[in-house]
Amino acid sequence: MVAGTAGCGGGPEVAAGPLAGGAAAPATHSTADERAAEKAALAAYSGYLDASRAASARSDPGHPALDRFLADPLLTRVRVAIRDAKEHGAMRTGKLVSDPTVVSVDLAADPPTVEIQDCLDASGYRLVYAKDRKTVPGTRGGRYLATATAARYPDGRWLVNSGAAHQDQPC
């Protein structure tokens, strides 16, 4: 999730590894191609965080922006976490601060992928009860490491399909 939706912690919902197929035949890619991939992946990541914040604030697992920036398995995990919070009368509120960087680009992968690392600051981002806005016990904020993978899909879009919030690793 990387990053920020409903759930147990203070950061975005996460999913296991990327949806990568077998490795493609070696190919050469220009620096411009890699820069374009980085830019598109970071835009998808930023869109993911914005969409998940908006969906979480409205307790709306079907928020239309989610599938513009997310793909499965992360998309389903985010939606389930928002639905779970809603069923328990909770929602997310506040501000989640992100400072992502690209750590690797693999344009030869099938699908092409970009790995992102982020230092999320969830100090002001809380899971609260919708009725009275009191913080849900056991939730925490703080600054911690988050990782995500964006992949380029056949239609050309870059979507975030996996992520992890490492709340045990401060940054």
Image (cartoon, rainbow, N blue to C red):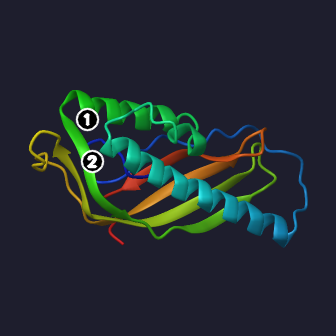
Q: Position of residue 84 (x, y in %)?
A: 28, 30
Residue at 39% x, 53% y is 165
Q: Quadrant of residue 116?
A: bottom right
| Residue 168 seen in this snapshot | no
The residue type indicated by label 2 comes to Arg
Question: Toward the viewer: 42 or 129?
Answer: 129
The residue type indicated by label 1 comes to Ala
The label number, if any, that marks residue 164 in the structure image:
none
Q: Is residue 128 left or right of residue 85?
A: left
Query: Which residue is disc 1 drawn over?
Result: 85
- The reply to whether dot 1 and dot 2 touch (C-beta < 8 Å) is yes
Q: Position of residue 63 (x, y in %)?
A: 45, 36
Residue at 13% x, 50% y is 135
Q: Residues within 10 Å of mark 2 (few under 14, many from 20)?
A: many
Give the alpha-carbon distance from disc 1 to disc 2, as whole Å: 9 Å
**Among the two numbered marks 1 and 2 on one chain, the one whose residue lies closer to the N terminus:** 1
Q: Residues within 10 Å of mark 1 (few under 14, many from 20)?
A: many
Query: Which residue is disc 2 drawn over?
Result: 92
Q: Quadrant of the C terminus?
A: bottom left
Question: Toward the viewer: 130 or 144?
Answer: 130
Q: Position of residue 36 (x, y in %)?
A: 76, 64
Residue at 47% x, 70% y is 99
Q: Is residue 91 left or right of residue 163?
A: left
Where disc 1 sits, the SS reads helix
Where disc 2 sits, the SS reads strand
Question: Toward the viewer: 17 or 157?
Answer: 157
| Residue 125 seen in this snapshot | yes
Q: Is residue 28 left or right of residue 77?
A: right
Q: Is residue 166 above or below residue 111?
A: below
Residue at 44% x, 50% y is 164
Q: Position of residue 57 (x, y in %)?
A: 31, 45
